[in-house]
């Protein structure tokens, strides 16, 4: 009787059909990332629906998905390493479909939030294992280009979500959006089962305590941010939420330093390249998904666009991303990563600030600012993806993929929460004086229902709030971008010095 053959966890088994697998993981990525953007188009529809959500509930309808996505994506990658990336990817797609079905059938806000949370769990199992599957199925000489294409897909996922979401919402209600996801997710699960090979597994165990603490800390943080306008920044609820978040974060670090296989080892961030790229990814998606959340409502309320027009109006942001797949790698080789990221963050920050001033200008001006933001995303995304991937060894591909996804989705969640909170607070300040007395409405739908004759003034108040939110997003992106570029330059100099020292020590005996 022969002994079963074991495979080292870092073994790479290139597929005979790498293009088919690349297409599969890109389609899975578009699905889970696209839903983050698609739901933004439905915010005005949900606000005036029979569910009657408050402003904070609207933010949680968006963020319930993103928060679970962000918090569980690293455990999802570790689960793929432990139990097999193919099986976890398929399980994630089936869970995603189940969550979408629950969302579509929701009779109240609570059940909708449950469905969104379950869908977020599914997304957390899908995205990091897309990276793991791709890395282990692609030959080393083709892996860089494949990762660049996949990385660009994560950026284009938001655009696809806007366009597809707009078409579905135009054809039906917000429920149509979720019902349409179910068969698509199940078809992708079948495609994965047929096309993807089983990869090697790691003996790495999971870390449930660390996972629960991480989820609780981030949820507490967002409760504080989102609850600020509704309860007051000095309220017991908000102060308690921020305090609990800090305490849980400290406990999480202490626990992770003690367990053998932490969900995310805090010591990894001693690697300057890894910590810098992670922060860069977070602020990149903070700005871009803060924009996606705001843009849909701004175009519908401020310009009177239909849902379909709002979905199509974001298309100019994709032009640089489509062209950048081939251009950016060569540009990075020519001018270096620090210069590329400097240009990227400047473009995004200036673009966000410009959009605030273009709220009432012709659409071509608005579109030009979107193109500038798209240039920034196209320049930054491949650089940051490659840096995070190269900072960890191949056997930790799932963890690397999880870290990329976590920083993206955490940035998205913070972008939605902070931009949405700034919007709500500024909107209520700019409402007509009679609406600022007593119970102040926090959504356009509630304000118009309370004072139908003042609809124009209410919409102007929303645009003013949106301008304030865009200014905040612009300033945050610029300041954190400066920090990221400075740290990237330092990391590049350190790696260059290490290479020179290694070369000198190698050649010394031959002198």
Image (cartoon, grey):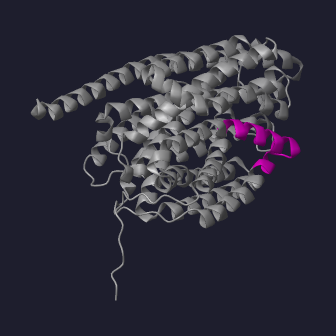
Q: Position of residue 133 (x, y in %)?
A: 51, 55
Of 253 and 6, which appears nearest the observer?
Answer: 6
Which residue lies at the image location 50% right of the left edge and 52% below the top edge?
138
Start-end of magenta stretch = 158-177
Please check the rendered image and state whether residue 164 is part of the magenta-colored stretch, yes or no: yes
Residue 238 lies left or right of residue 201; in this view the side is right
Position of the C terminus by quadrant: top left
Residue 227 appears in the rendering: no
Q: Position of residue 4 (x, y in %)?
A: 36, 78
413 to 345, vertically: above or below: below
Please check the rendered image and state whether residue 204 is part of the magenta-colored stretch, yes or no: no
Which residue lies at the image location 75% right of the left edge and 17% below the top edge?
366
Position of the N terminus by quadrant: bottom left
Q: Position of residue 305 (x, y in %)?
A: 85, 26
364 to 499, vertically: above or below: above
Of 223 and 151, which appears nearest the observer?
Answer: 151
Which residue lies at the image location 70% right of the left edge and 57% below the top edge?
102
């Amino acid at each position: 009787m022969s002994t079963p053959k074991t495979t080292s966890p870092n073994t790479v088994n290139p597929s005979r059909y790498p293009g088919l697998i690349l297409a599969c993981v890109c389609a899975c990525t578009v699905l889970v990332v696209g839903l983050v953007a698609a739901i933004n188009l439905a915010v005005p529809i949900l606000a005036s629906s029979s569910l009657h959500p408050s402003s904070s509930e609207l933010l949680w309808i968006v963020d319930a998905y993103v928060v679970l996505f962000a918090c569980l994506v690293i455990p999802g990658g570790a689960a793929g390493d432990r139990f097999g990336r193919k099986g976890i990817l398929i399980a994630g797609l089936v869970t995603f479909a189940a969550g979408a079905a629950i969302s579509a059938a929701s009779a109240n806000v609570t059940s909708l939030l449950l469905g969104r949370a379950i869908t977020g769990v599914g997304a957390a199992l899908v995205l990091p294992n897309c990276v793991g599957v791709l890395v282990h199925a692609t030959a080393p000489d083709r892996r860089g280009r494949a990762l660049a294409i996949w990385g660009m897909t994560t950026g284009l996922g938001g655009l696809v979500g806007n366009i597809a979401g707009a078409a579905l919402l135009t054809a039906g209600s917000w429920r149509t959006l979720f019902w349409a996801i179910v068969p698509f997710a199940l078809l992708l699960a079948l495609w994965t089962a047929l096309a993807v090979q089983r990869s090697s597994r790691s003996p790495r165990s999971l870390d449930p305590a660390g996972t629960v603490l991480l989820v609780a800390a981030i949820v507490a943080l967002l409760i504080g941010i989102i609850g600020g306008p509704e309860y007051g920044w000095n309220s017991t609820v908000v102060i308690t939420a921020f305090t609990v978040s800090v305490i849980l974060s400290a406990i999480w670090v202490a626990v992770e330093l003690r367990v053998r296989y932490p969900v995310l080892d805090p010591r990894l961030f001693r690697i300057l390249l890894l910590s810098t790229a992670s922060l860069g990814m977070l602020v990149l998606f903070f700005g871009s998904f803060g924009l996606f959340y705001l843009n849909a409502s701004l175009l519908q309320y401020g310009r009177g666009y239909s849902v379909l027009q709002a979905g199509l109006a974001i298309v100019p942001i994709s032009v640089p991303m489509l062209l950048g797949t081939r251009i950016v790698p060569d540009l990075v080789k020519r001018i270096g990563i620090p210069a590329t990221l400097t240009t990227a963050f400047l473009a995004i920050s200036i673009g966000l600030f410009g959009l605030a001033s273009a709220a009432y200008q012709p659409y071509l001006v608005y579109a030009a600012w979107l193109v500038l933001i798209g240039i920034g995303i196209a320049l930054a995304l491949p650089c940051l993806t490659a840096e995070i991937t190269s900072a960890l060894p191949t056997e930790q591909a799932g963890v690397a993929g999880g870290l990329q996804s976590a920083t993206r989705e955490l940035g998205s969640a913070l972008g939605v929460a902070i931009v949405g909170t700034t919007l709500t607070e500024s909107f209520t300040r700019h409402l007509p004086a009679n609406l600022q007395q007593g119970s102040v409405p926090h959504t356009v739908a509630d304000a118009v229902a309370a004072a139908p004759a003042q609809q124009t003034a209410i919409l102007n108040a929303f645009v003013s709030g949106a301008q304030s939110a865009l200014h905040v997003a612009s300033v945050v992106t610029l300041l954190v971008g400066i920090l990221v570029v400075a740290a990237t330059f330092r990391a590049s100099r350190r790696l260059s010095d290490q290479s020179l020292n290694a070369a000198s020590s190698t050649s010394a005996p031959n002198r």
